[in-house]
Amino acid sequence: MQSIISTQFTPDELTELIRLAVSEAITAFVPYPTLPTEPRYLSRKETAARLTLKTLWDRTRRGDITAHRFGNRVLYKLEDVEAALSKVRTTLNR
């Protein structure tokens, strides 16, 4: 048996209820947050914290890691650095 409940909402209250319902539906539908499409860049200092400056210089010279110039700054893509590090880990695990 269905019952009908009549209530009154202001337009703002109704808008907020709809917004909440849509937000919950989207959250339930998309289980993982979307990843940013822009690459994240690291400075030499940040990159050297994962490697050493000498290793960074050697890897850049050999072409394992690509350096990107922005004016006077030299930056490295985080994904390039992580790929180079995983390549080293894979080589060491053999």
Image (cartoon, rainbow, N blue to C red):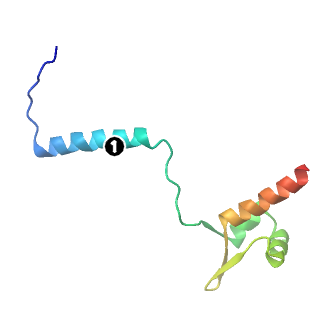
Using the image as rendered, state which of residue 58 and residue 64 is in the foreground.
64
Relative horizontal placement of residue 32, taking residue 15 as reference (left or right): right
* 8 in relation to 36, above or below: above
- Label 1: state its secondary structure: helix
User: What residue is disc 1 on?
Assistant: 23
Relative horizontal placement of residue 60, taking residue 26 as reference (left or right): right
Using the image as rendered, state which of residue 21 and residue 49 is in the foreground.
21
* 49 in relation to 73, above or below: above
Determine the residue positioned at 89% across, 49% down.
93
Residue 10, quarter of the rendered image: top left
Using the image as rendered, state which of residue 51 and residue 40 is in the foreground.
40
Give the mark count: 1
Residue 77: give x, y in percent of width and height.
66, 68
Three-letter amino acid code of the residue under disc 1:
Ser
Which residue is farthest bottom? 71
Relative horizontal placement of residue 69, taking residue 25 as reference (left or right): right
Which residue is farthest front? 1
Q: Residues within 10 Å of mark 1 (few under 14, many from 20)?
A: few
